[in-house]
Amino acid sequence: MNKVILIGRLSRDPELRHTANGTAVCQINVAISRPVAQGKEPETDFINVTVWNKPAENIAKYLSKGRQVAIEGRIQTGSYTDKDGNNRTSFEVVAEVSS
């Protein structure tokens, strides 16, 4: 099973675009504090999230940097070659919306 639930704050404004066939896709970045031992500085993870279709349009319209969000989705990996020719792996959450 591949399921993840995140609660955090948007670290930047949503970026909405449309595919060639007009499907809305929104990229967001969610900042999530990692639990640490008492007295230590908190650590934060920044998770890339992709949202599709009508929910993508709603996120872009109603949310902005700093707003708290809850995301349910799945982890997806990809690979690419960076500008220096190194192979890299990317991770993102693809949001799933219940109907």
Image: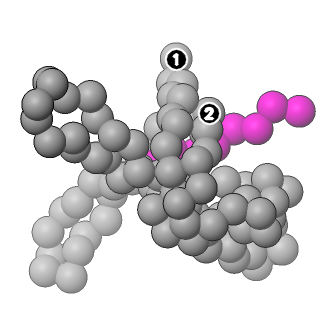
Question: In the rendered structure, does residue 86 fall within the stretch colored magenta?
Answer: no
Q: Is residue 93 magenta?
A: yes
Q: Which mark is residue 29?
A: none
* Residue sitting at x 19%, y 63%: 87
x 41%, y 51%: residue: 31
Q: Is residue 89 left or right of residue 58?
A: left
Q: Which residues are magenta?
A: 92-99
Q: Is residue 14 left or right of residue 88?
A: right
Residue 65 relative to residue 92: left or right = right
Which residue lies at the image location 55% right of the left edge and 66% below the top edge? 65
Q: Position of residue 4 (x, y in %)?
A: 51, 28
Q: Could you tell me residue 96's position as x and y percent?
A: 69, 38
Q: Amino acid at mark 1?
A: Met
Q: Name the amino acid type tagged 2.
A: Glu
Q: Position of residue 89 (x, y in %)?
A: 27, 54
**Is 45 in front, or is 55?**
45
Q: Whole-percent x and y of residue 93?
A: 51, 44
Mark 1 vs mark 2, foreground winner is: 2
Task: Give the mark, 1 or 2, whose residue is nearer the N terminus.
Answer: 1
Q: Nearer the viewer, residue 9 or 49?
A: 9
Q: Which mark is residue 72?
A: 2
Q: Residue at x 51, y 35 (%)?
A: 6
Number of residues whose C-alpha sits closer than 10 Å to that of mark 2, classed few (under 14), some (14–19) or many (20 or more): some
Q: Say how the picture is coloured.
A: one colour
Please name the residue that numbered disc 1 is placed on. 1
